[in-house]
């Protein structure tokens, strides 16, 4: 029995090489982890320093560009403005504005607090010029030709243009002016939200946000009015006067420019709804009015209403 027990006994020996191999694997694993930990830390430190250096370079470069180019506060450099005016006034288009007409509008836009809100009636030859001169500001164009407005927006996606349907006719201006005077305390009052107005002279089908903006500059350079059934500019001039007087905030004054000023009824409409006492300068083709916002209970467009009565007595197309 004893011999059987001894013969069944097994002796297990651990070779020293096996122990050495396990210890070596652990050391390699530790070295591997340590290496990647060190590499990660070095990468993190380098990335942080590199990012800080890159940010500093970009900031310095932007400051240098802004200082040398004159784009501080979003304003165009004087040389750029003068160049734009020069080439715009030299166009072969017979309907383009001259330098003497462009300059007053450009000067007002340049002095306007940034961002400046510019509303233009008419997609004329100068629409890209107005967009460029009102750099970083809001510029909206209103035109009676829906197809042309869509074409311009497709050609220049940065242009914000809308079409409007005019219901006025040059052959009906006497009746339109008489109706406006009769309803001066109701639908055609000088301070109101035209979006809800039924005045025949007011434009109430523009996009809603147009009525919410406090416009700093309004240019009336459309629609055309050189034939009896043409809509004429009585409606945009009336609308400009109401928008200027109905401002809720921003600058209390609105600069309103009327192009083709002495061509016919534009001067009459301007004196009636923008007021002669607000006319600060005029040339043969451009009238410049400065209209202040009014209290909502005001019902007279002009302080000296008699001055407009005499001018509006002579209607001629």
Image (spheres, rainbow, N blue to C red):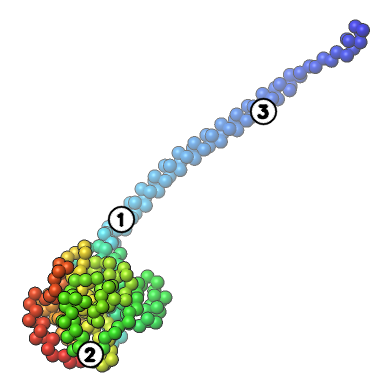
When asked about the image quadrant of residue 147, the answer is bottom left
Q: Secondary structure at mark 3?
A: helix
Say which of 86 and 29 sits in front. Answer: 29
According to the picture, the residue beneath numbered tag 1 turns out to be: 64
Residue at (32% x, 82% y) in the render: 165
With respect to residue 114, does 234 lie above or below? below
Real-space Cα separation, disc 1 to disc 3, in angstroms: 58 Å
According to the picture, the residue beneath numbered tag 3 turns out to be: 25
Query: Residue 246, position in %: x, y?
Result: 20, 69
Mark sitting earlier along the chain (2/1): 1
Residue 104 appears in the rendering:
no
Query: In this image, 139 relative to 53: left or right?
Result: left
With respect to residue 16, does 107 lie above or below? below
Real-space Cα separation, disc 2 to disc 3, in angstroms: 101 Å
Circles 2 and 1: CB distance less than 8 Å? no
Q: Residue 172 bears which disc, if any?
A: 2
Say which of 126 and 290 sits in front. Answer: 290
Query: Residue 98, position in %: x, y?
Result: 23, 81
Identify the image quadrant of the C terminus.
bottom left
Residue at (28% x, 91% y) in the render: 229
- How many residues crowd around disc 3 within 10 Å: few (fewer than 14), some, or many (20 or more)? few
Residue at (11% x, 86% y) in the render: 311
């Amino acid at each position: 029995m004893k011999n059987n027990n001894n013969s069944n006994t097994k002796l297990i020996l651990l070779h020293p090489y096996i122990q050495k191999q396990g210890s070596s694997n652990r050391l390699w694993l530790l070295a591997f982890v340590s290496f990647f930990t060190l590499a990660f830390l070095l990468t993190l430190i380098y990335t942080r320093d590199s990012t800080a250096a890159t940010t500093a370079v970009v900031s310095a470069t932007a400051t240098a560009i802004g200082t040398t180019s004159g784009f501080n506060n979003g304003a165009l450099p004087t040389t750029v403005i003068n160049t734009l005016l020069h080439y715009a006034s030299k166009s072969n288009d017979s309907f383009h504005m001259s330098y003497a007409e462009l300059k007053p509008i450009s000067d007002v836009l340049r002095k306007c607090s940034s961002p400046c809100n510019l509303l233009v009636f008419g997609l004329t030859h100068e629409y890209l010029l107005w967009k460029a001169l009102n750099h970083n500001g809001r510029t909206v164009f209103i035109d009676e030709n829906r197809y042309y407005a869509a074409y311009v927006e497709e050609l220049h996606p940065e242009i914000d243009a809308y079409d409007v349907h005019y219901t006025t006719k040059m052959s009906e201006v006497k009746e339109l002016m008489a109706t406006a005077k009769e309803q001066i305390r109701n639908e055609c009052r000088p301070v109101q939200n035209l979006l809800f107005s039924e005045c025949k002279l007011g434009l109430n089908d523009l996009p809603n946000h147009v009525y919410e903006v406090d416009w700093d500059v309004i240019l009336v350079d459309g629609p055309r009015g050189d034939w009896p059934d043409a809509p004429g500019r009585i409606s945009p001039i009336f609308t400009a006067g109401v928008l200027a007087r109905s401002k809720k905030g921003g600058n209390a004054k609105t600069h309103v420019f009327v192009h083709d000023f002495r061509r016919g009824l534009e001067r009459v409409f301007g004196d009636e709804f923008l007021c002669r006492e607000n006319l600060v300068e005029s040339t043969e083709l451009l009238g410049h009015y400065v209209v202040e916002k009014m209290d909502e209970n005001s019902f007279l467009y002009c302080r000296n209403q008699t001055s407009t009565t005499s001018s509006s007595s002579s209607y001629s197309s």
